Image: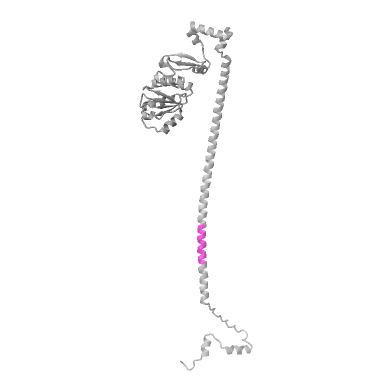
Amino acid sequence: MSDDFSFEDMMAQQGVQKMGGRKSSARRGGPAKGAAAPPARVRPSIVKVTELDAMQAERDEARAALTTTRRRVQSLEAALAKATQAEEALTTELADEREQRAAESQARAERDEESRGVRQALERQLKEATRSLNANEEARTSLADALVDRGCANEFEMMTVLNGLLLQRPRELLESIVLAEPHAIAKVLSERVALVSSGVDFTPDKNMVVLSVPKDRCEICGGSDITASFHGFVQACIDEEVDVVTVVGGSPAYRRQLKLLAEADDDAPRLNLVSGTRRREARKAQSDMRGSDVVILWGGTELDHSVSEGYRGKDARIVRIAHRGIARMLQLARSDLRRKK
């Protein structure tokens, strides 16, 4: 290093003025006129590490808040898109429903119009039928009216004329009578005329006409001896006020046939059919007796003595029959019921 080195020269080269010189200048009255003012010194600001950390934390929080906000915005945008899609679907569905309602309303209107047309047509037909019926009523004349017009004064004279015509010219008379209401005469014939074969137990009503016919045309038995016998038995039960009959014995086939006969006849008593070969407890037998008006012990068929012995006492009328066939059993039972006790 040179001996001529001076610290003040070096500081002056760096632009640093000597403090003592500035004070002396100020005391001397400041810088000379026209001289440039020295540049102001800028002191660098010193930032602490803790402040930097705090600022970094704030930036991180701001970034996190921004990320959350962006996610929230995305979620809201997705929800908005979904709501928009649902709204569009609802709008479409509403439009379809309105269209369907319009179609249904149109179809209903068409049906109503068709119904009105049908109703009006039916009303016209009814009016025409009513007019035709009224005309027929006015024009219709009964057989009694025709006989009165001919001069008959009472029913006896009418019967005399009809009987005479039926004896002399039956076909001519019958074919000349045209029925305006066939169902009316059909009802009279059904209720007041009975076709019965001989030998059938039948008690007609006092106002009924009984026509004797061959057995195959009989309305009571239909040509069957068993049916005829069962009908006679039923008639006897009605006359004697018998409502419940217990029949003990008979083969399974016989019992089935009796059951079918009873089911086919509305007037038949209730039948309690008991097997004659299966052991019957005494209490059940006594119950049968108490619940029956008549007990038939059918001894000519499958009937064990041990079973028939249970039916003793006076709780019911006991009828003992020793015949095997159904028809004959029913005939004997009918005869027993009609016999005075």
Question: What coloring was used for the rendering?
Answer: one colour
- In percent of the image, x 57 and y 20: which residue is there? 130
Secondary structure predominantly adopted by residues drawn in magenta: helix
Question: In terms of image quadrants, where is residue 148?
Answer: top right
Residue shown at the point (53%, 43%) measured from the top left? 95
Frontmost residue, 173 versus 276: 276
Frontmost residue, 228 versus 98: 228
Towards the viewer: 22 or 336: 336
Q: Is residue 201 magenta?
A: no
Residue found at the far bottom of this picture: 3
Comparing 83 with 34, the one in front is 83
Left/right of residue 216 with respect to residue 183 in the rendered view: left
Q: What is the residue that sits farthest to the right in this orientation?
A: 29
**What residue is shown at x 40% (from left), y 25% (from top)?**
297
> Which residue is rendered at x = 51% and y = 74% of the image?
52
Q: For residue 74: magenta?
A: yes
- When the figure is inspected, residue 324 is found, relative to residue 30, above or below; the finding is above
* Residue positioned most to the top: 168
Tally of numbered discs: 0
Relative to 196, does residue 113 appear above or below in the rendering? below
Q: Position of residue 274 (x, y in %)?
A: 40, 29
Q: Position of residue 131 (x, y in %)?
A: 58, 19
> Where residue 180 appears, x then y in whole percent?
53, 16
Q: Position of residue 56 (x, y in %)?
A: 51, 71
Residue 224 visible to an observer of this rendering: no
Q: Is residue 115 visible?
A: yes
Query: Which residue range is magenta in the image?
Result: 62-75
Quadrant of the rendered structure where residue 16 is? bottom right
Tell me if residue 259 comes above or below residue 13 in the rendering.
Answer: above
